Amino acid sequence: MKVYVIGIGLIGGSMALDIQALDKDAVIIGVDANENHLGQAIELGIIHQKAELNEVVDADFVILAVPVDIALGLLPKILDLVTDETLVFEVGSTKSPICEAVVNHPKRRNFLATHPIAGTEFSGPTAAIRNLFVDKTNIICEVEKTTFKLQEKGLKLFKDLGMRIRYMEPKSHDKHIAYVSHLSHISSFMLGKTVIEKEKDEKDIFDMAGSGFESTVRLAKSSPAMWTPIFKQNKKQVVKSLEEYIANLSQFKNLLESGNYEQIFHEMENTNRIKEILNGK
Amino acid sequence: MKVYVIGIGLIGGSMALDIQALDKDAVIIGVDANENHLGQAIELGIIHQKAELNEVVDADFVILAVPVDIALGLLPKILDLVTDETLVFEVGSTKSPICEAVVNHPKRRNFLATHPIAGTEFSGPTAAIRNLFVDKTNIICEVEKTTFKLQEKGLKLFKDLGMRIRYMEPKSHDKHIAYVSHLSHISSFMLGKTVIEKEKDEKDIFDMAGSGFESTVRLAKSSPAMWTPIFKQNKKQVVKSLEEYIANLSQFKNLLESGNYEQIFHEMENTNRIKEILNGK
């Protein structure tokens, strides 16, 4: 198997590691704008060799795993280069813009839009880990626009990586992911900001931080280069989710100010069912 | 060693388990308003026997580990009962109200106000776990108001449980803990609420939730009976932290609406240093 990975970070790098484990003969070729990352990826055994983007001609898979703004520019160029046998798929957190970017591309049928719901707060080649995708959901959009034999090829790979598949419309994906992913990141970033602003004497105060704070603020470690274009591309839905979140926080504050502790208890009790919802996943 | 644990939940139960491991001859006696919890605690080997509150007379330690509103009522009654040899300490997440509640109590010197920064989102006796307190911070307030020999007794126990000690004024504790703990809980509860409200078709949508959402929303599983009185007792500081959090979220929303992506990048980059701050803990 010959695989080009464009962007050797958490997602691209982790896929590369798993593909090597699945197929001992796989040749993994890395393309990255960052020369240091390419060097690290070779040292870490994530890729076998490096290449330039214009060398991406014949391959079984081209995995496009770069920030979503960069992906919009690279995808058409990659599709221009590849042969009929190559499946190009990208893995970004927004799906409408990338699908629109290639809607009229002559090689549209070589492309599959995916979003593996997997990751950590870390980035770059050193963040790549084995088995990241086991039991995770991979959301696939506009599957019918991909050649059937390349669909099959992609689905087999995702299954071998351990993922379950869900099919969605790009617009529907972007709407719901704003709530279950993008909003969580902003909530976490702004919590981190609020606490850092408040606490000048950091050493003293963060001694008081427990595992609860660490968990809630974990996503504030995420990469701004990755997340700024996601928020930009999904602006409308993210703004809407933020408005609803802010309204709920303001209402909670009002309940607290007016001393309505019965309703505060009720709000929390109602939300406790997130337990069962997440267990049922 | 003879220890009464009033409230056999996550904190009281976990302390009971660790004390048994530290001292094979320790006798742990449980007091709890919930008969089922007492039964469970005996079955799980957390306590050896149960008792009524008025039997709490002679002991090495009385650990008061109940919701902070209940603690306000129970602490004076417990102090009325105990002998000079007994250290009574409570472990609640607010410190000013409990210190004020016993400021003039004749047995004030038998009492130590503590806040072990340790826990999970679970509650009740089944949530009790071994080694919960290892490498955690225990915040002690008004240490000088406790008899010296009982201070020593308490500090030895906390050290044996694996905790490091920090001394703070009750008011200072309550102010800072609003940011690093109480605000995180509200942020998480309201995130859970916003997503649940939005997503009627829960099964479908929570398939899209990744580990990021789970981490950010984890605290929304917490007990309303424990958290309502905490918010009530620390109302002023919690409202203030909420105001600042809402202002930061609104500013982020405005930046997004006006398309100021440079500043959005900058905001996230600035907050990324939460990484080093938490590592430095």
Image: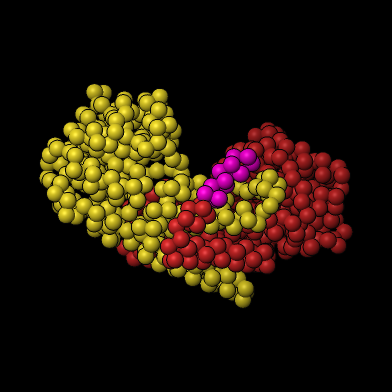
Chain colours: A red, B yellow
> Observer-nearest residue: A80 or A144?
A144
> Observer-nearest residue: B86 or A88?
B86
Q: How many marks?
A: 0
Vertical arrangement, residue A226 with respect to residue A210, above or below:
below
Residue at the location (64% across, 66% down)?
A240
Residue at the location (74% across, 45% down)?
A166
The range drawn in magenta is A269-281
Vertical arrangement, residue A257 with respect to residue B130, above or below:
below
Vertical arrangement, residue A128 with respect to residue A244, above or below:
above
Q: Name the image quarter holding residue B124.
A: top left
Q: Position of residue A252 (x, y in %)?
A: 50, 62
> Observer-nearest residue: A271 or A61?
A271
Predominant secondary structure, magenta span: helix
**Which residue reaches farthest bottom?**
B258
**Residue B181 magenta-highlighted:** no
Q: Name the image quarter holding residue A130.
A: top right
The answer, for residue B4, to whether it is visible in the render is: yes
Residue at the location (49% across, 70% down)?
B247
Q: The N terminus of chain A lies in which quarter of the figure?
A: top right
Q: Position of residue B221 (x, y in %)?
A: 51, 46
